[in-house]
Amino acid sequence: MTTDEQQQFESEADARTARASVRARHLAELMERRPDLFGVHPAADLVADSVRWTA
């Protein structure tokens, strides 16, 4: 792997991490606004709870 390829890989990985963080934050905000959604999708509950515990 060349240096340019390594830098591109790291840049893409950073972008994926940033997008995942934004999605988790938005999901937590949605769950806070709509508590009736808890229990609908277990993975969403887990993410929302995880974000709240780390905030």
Image: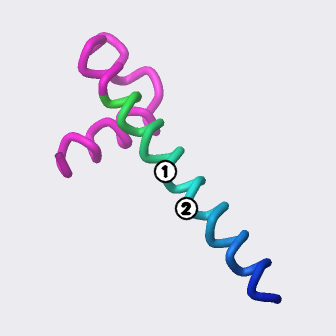
Structural crowding at the residue carrying mark 2, measured as other residues with C-alpha within 10 Å and reported as few (<14), some (14–19) or many (≥20): few
What is the spatial separation of the Cα atoms under label 2 and label 1, in whole angstroms?
Answer: 6 Å
Occupied quadrant, residue 30: top left
Q: Is residue 41 left or right of residue 39?
A: right
Q: Position of residue 12 (x, y in %)?
A: 66, 61
Helix, strand or loop at label 2? It is: helix
Q: Could you tell me the amino acid type at mark 2?
A: Asp
Occupied quadrant, residue 14: bottom right
Q: Residue at image x 36%, y 36%?
A: 25
Q: Residue at image x 24%, y 20%?
A: 32
Q: Is residue 20 above or below residue 32?
A: below
Residue pointed to by mark 1 = 18
Q: Is residue 52 left or right of residue 1?
A: left
Q: Nearer the viewer, residue 6 or 33?
A: 6
Q: Position of residue 24 (x, y in %)?
A: 41, 39
Do tag 2 and tag 1 residues touch (Cβ < 8 Å)? yes
Q: Could you tell me the amino acid type at mark 1?
A: Ala
Residue pointed to by mark 2 = 14
Q: Residue at image x 37%, y 24%?
A: 39
Q: Position of residue 26 (x, y in %)?
A: 39, 29
Magenta residues (range) = 29-55
Residue 38 lies in the magenta-colored region: yes
Q: Main secondary structure of the magenta part?
A: helix
Q: Nearer the viewer, residue 27 or 7?
A: 7
Residue 50 lies in the magenta-colored region: yes
Q: Residue at image x 63%, y 72%?
A: 10
Q: Which mark is residue 7?
A: none
How many discs appear? Answer: 2
The N terminus, quarter of image: bottom right
